[in-house]
Amino acid sequence: MTNKPVFSAQLEAQLRAGAPAIFIHSAEEARVDQLLIALQERLGLKRIHEWNLGHGWVDFTNKQPLSNPDSGTTELEHALLQLLDADLEQTLILIKGARLALENNRLAIARLKQLLNRIERGHAIGCSVILVSESVCIPASIESQVTLLPLPLPDREDIQALLAQADASGQLTLPGDLVDLAVSGLSGLTASEIGRLLRIVSLQTPVLTEQGLKTMLHEKEQIIAKSGVLALVRVDEAPDDIGGLEKLKHWLAQRAAIVSQLDKATRQGVKAPKGVLIAGMPGCGKSLTARVAASLFQLPLLRLDIGSLLGKYVGESEHNMRRALNMAEMVSPCILWVDELEKAFVGMGGGNASEVTARLLGYFLTWMQEKTGAVFVIATANDISALPPELLRKGRFDEIFYVGFPNAVEREHILKIHLRKARQPVDGLDLPELVQQCRDYCGADIENAVNEALANAFIAGSPLTQTHLAEAIQSTIPLRETLREQVGKYEELFEKLKLRPASEYQGLSVAQMIRMAADPNQVKREEVASNPDCPDDQLEKLAGDSQRSVVKAVYENPRCPERLLTMRINIAQNSPLYDVELLALACLNDNAPEDLLVRQVKDGQVARELRAKLAGRVKGPMLLQLLASDPEVEVRRGLASNPALPEVMQLQLLKDKDTSVVAALILNPSLASGAERQLLEHGDSSIKQAFAKRPELTEAEQQLLLKNADAALKIMLSLHPKLAHGVQLLLAKDPLQSVRLNLAGNPGLSKATQVVLAGDTYGAVKVALAKNPGLCLDDADQLSLKKYVLENRHLAGGFGVGVGGSLAGVFSWSGKTS
Ligand code: ATP
């Protein structure tokens, strides 16, 4: 059944039941006229008196004024007086522009009430007042006597009739294949809007074309926007514009697949998807998801702003809701995005707020339950606590998803998305570091930080760098910080309600961490305290935990907030809160403020062991400099091993009177080339030997070491696991047998070196080579080496090479070739 017969049947039923007044909510006066004419006939009414704002009483059939407009009697309050003596039996009194006529017009309202009383008391049988207006205004004093009936928009059948009319009158010819599209394009509009739109299109082209349809859509956007309750949103987002929210994206893609073949799906018993409620934190991508859904479903997206529905007149909010939902049904198939759903249920001033809320909710729920049109609802909400429980019950929406703050993996995706949108390469960036820096951030915060970094880079006239991004992240105050209390409340609630998470959690979500931080199980609290993704506020809470292991984990956390560390480092030695172990952890944390550490060291507040540990890991130049002149060798030795030590300070430490400091420097993996050259060229044998122990040695360094090397150094070198090929050959020909013997056992030898050693005149070298696990000689060479070893078994013991047991290994290893 279409809306149209339902409406006229409702109207007829009201009139037959003797309703004193009916408020028809519609801007379509011509349609109302037609309906009333039909009713007049069916009900056998004697007459229709029409009043309008412009002329007062007019002839209903030809709209000619019945009284002189200058007589001063056209206003409603005067016009109503004229009915006092009139015969009103079987009469409809039609008042058009009712809202403007009644609004703030106490006299008109009072006289209308008298008239309604008269009808109610049976003084005018079969008489009803029909109020018509494009917006609802039912004064409280007559509310109980007035029935509100909204006139639905034209349905597909009506639109088809209007198009046929335009076609028949020669206004716009419609090719058969475009009729369906034209009907869809015009649905959701009033008859007069459709008429106007057809006139606009016909001015462009007398025959409807694709271009004409585009014009239609464009005009429709304007009309929908003008309605004030809905907006047609243009989208160009794709699923990979959303970072994370994998589960939600997957779920939506599945519903889109059903909607795209709805007929087939329903034939197989699949229920048409109704919609989804996406609840969650501000700025985390709820609206973005609604937009992406429109791309996935390939359907128009209508945005319903709940705030704009709320009206000040009785029935206005419900009417607006009805109008919006009606319009969505007419535009269907479409996606109706109900943004900030909770707004319908909170913050409504006025005494009748709860009544209106209940009615709005009731209407919305019934509509959700009964809607037959292909309208897929995406409702988004931040404050789910404001939503009535009926809405959250299973079955209203197909699913309720919770969108939380992004985890580390998601933050990286979001960063990449916004860098990609800005056409910025990510190659040279340390993304994991940036991801850590914005651990409390929502998607919108990350987007803001990227924009800020881009602007700063532009102003500086340089390409975007890690520093721009890091600084922008640092200067962004995340929403989670600004809305701390609110967010905390939501997080707790979402956890309690056990809503389905939109994210595929890799690691812990913020909500999970908050729950774990309050868990009675200390292992859980410890786990969250050591999680680098743990929010600052939770870490601050855990720093006061009763379990020491939890507190220690907080200070060891690489993301422990500077504020906490500062407080801990500042605790004086005579304070009962002073704790050497926690102080050490705080000082050693990379986030500890350098200036504070410098002051503490200068003031003698940091013990030797802690200074030595600090020296091995600090990065700040002031602290490094201060520790370089520390009187304690242990501290300077720690500094020498610090990978962040700049070259100037390495050179400075090279001159240290304590050789252990220099030895530590040699083993520093970040030893600069200048310092290295100094060591290799001017260092004594012990320094060079220490150098030869470095796991990474370039060929040039090995060659330098070999120059003028004594036996001990050569042996040291011959054992190096990464001995360069050229150096191997030199050592293989070294006159010292002990050097060649040690070299023969080195598993990293090249084949060429092995060939040289296999021909060594010294038997023990051959034996050692045969034992070498990296032996890779050709079969024939291996065979003769084996033979030699077998024949000269006595050599193994004689040269102190443990051949006995290992010979068996050699044989079994080379057995395959024998
Ligand atoms: P609110 O509740 O405040 O309306 P919301 O959850 O609807 O917030 P959006 O409006 O979708 O958040 O997000 C704001 C902007 O932040 C988006 O336009 C997008 O650019 C960015 N953003 C948020 N979340 C993500 C995400 N997961 N991936 C990519 N961008 C995101």
Image (tube, grey):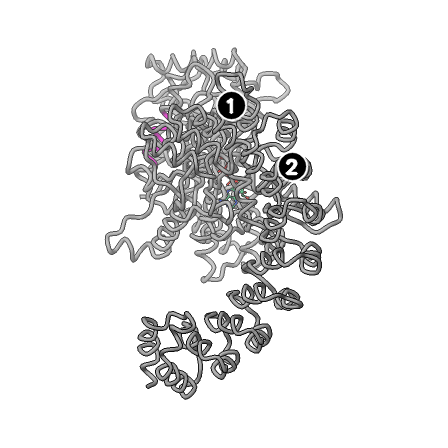
Q: CA distance from mark 2 to mark 1?
A: 83 Å
- Location of residue 17 with respect to 338 vertically, above or below: above
Residue in view at x 28 percent, y 38 percent: 395
Residue 551 vs residue 776, the one in the foreground: 776
The label on residue 311 is none
Tag nearer the camera, 2 or 1? 2
* Residue 190 appears in the picture as rendered: no
In the image, taking residue 361 as reference, residue 668 lies left or right, namely: right
Q: Which residue is mark 2?
A: 627
Secondary element under disc 1, as helix, strand or loop, is: helix
Q: Are marks 2 and 1 in contact (CB under 8 Å)?
A: no
Q: Main secondary structure of the magenta part?
A: helix
Magenta residues, as a range? Answer: 359-367
* Residue 375 appears in the picture as rendered: yes
Q: Which residue is mark 1?
A: 99
For mark 2, does the 10 Å Cα neighbourhood hold few (<14), some (14 to 19), or many (20 or more) residues?
many
Residue 740, position as x, y percentages in the image: 52, 74
- Location of residue 167 with respect to 345 vertically, above or below: below
Asked if the stretch drawn in magenta spans residue 21, the answer is: no
Q: In which quadrant is the C terminus drawn?
A: bottom left
Secondary element under disc 2, as helix, strand or loop, is: helix
